[in-house]
Image (tube, rainbow, N blue to C red):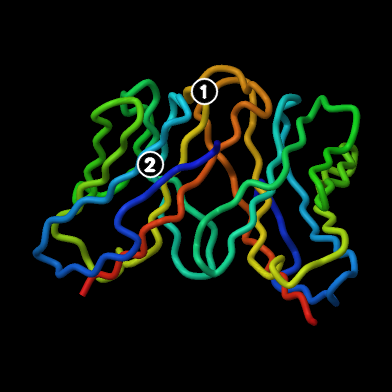
Amino acid sequence: AQKITQTQPGMFVQEKEAVTLDCTYDTSDPSYGLFWYKQPSSGEMIFLIYQGSYDQQNATEGRYSLNFQKARKSANLVISASQLGDSAMYFCAMREGGGGANNLFFGTGTRLTVIP
Amino acid sequence: DTEVTQTPKHLVMGMTNKKSLKCEQHMGHRAMYWYKQKAKKPPELMFVYSYEKLSINESVPSRFSPECPNSSLLNLHLHALQPEDSALYLCASSPWSSGGLFRGSTDTQYFGPGTRLTVL
């Protein structure tokens, strides 16, 4: 089974509007972390936001927030007030705890296009 | 500062060439990673170095040879590559070593800008 599922290959959003990028995950480990990365066409993977499985509150970083619903195993990224520079590929990733390798499991990504 | 640098940005090489990719970080991180990313796909983990020792090799062909000369530097030596090895090669680092319990946000991996490799 896929550890991370991103069901939206592509999304469009009007400039200044908010957009939600979906991410569901699968793990039996009680300790895990969820990460979102942005990858512009230049290639660099830019870390955006982190949510830990034991965190009581949803993570926020500027215009980025994470809608964490633990029971549903979802960790959707919300981008508020979209800007043209937000056009990029967005990857959701998970790191499981409990020992073992520091592997990041990536989803297949969502390409976001911001329309002027 | 969460900067990871990679050189070169672009590399074109023939199948008989030997070349190296370089990655550097000055954040005091003790884990460093090499990923390979094909177009429109997520990154795939190749190698993990933990405290300058190779801790993970994800069944990568021997034509890729990693090296960690010190805690700030990671190289990837390339020899006799195939055209299908053309990809974006990303380096990353994180504060903690691989293995052991997950330590939360301090396990965040920070990526460099990547090297776009073309094998002719």
Quadrant of residue B17 within the rendered picture: bottom left
Q: Position of residue B104 (x, y in %)?
A: 68, 25
Q: Quadrant of the N terminus of chain B?
A: top right
The relative height of residue A107 versus residue A71 in the rendered view (above or below) is below
To the question of a shared chain for discs 2 and 1, the answer is yes
Q: Dot 1 falls on which chain?
A: B
**Residue at disc 1, secondary structure:** loop
Q: Quadrant of the C terminus of chain B?
A: bottom left
Residue type at mark 2 is: Glu
Location of mark 1 (residue): B96
**Residue drawn at (37%, 27%), measured in percent from left and top?**
B55
Residue B38 vs residue A111: left or right?
left
Residue A13 vs residue B111: left or right?
right
Query: Which of these two is toward me, A70 or B28?
Result: B28
Q: Position of residue A7 (x, y in %)?
A: 75, 64
Q: Position of residue A63 (x, y in %)?
A: 83, 52
Location of mark 2 (residue): B58
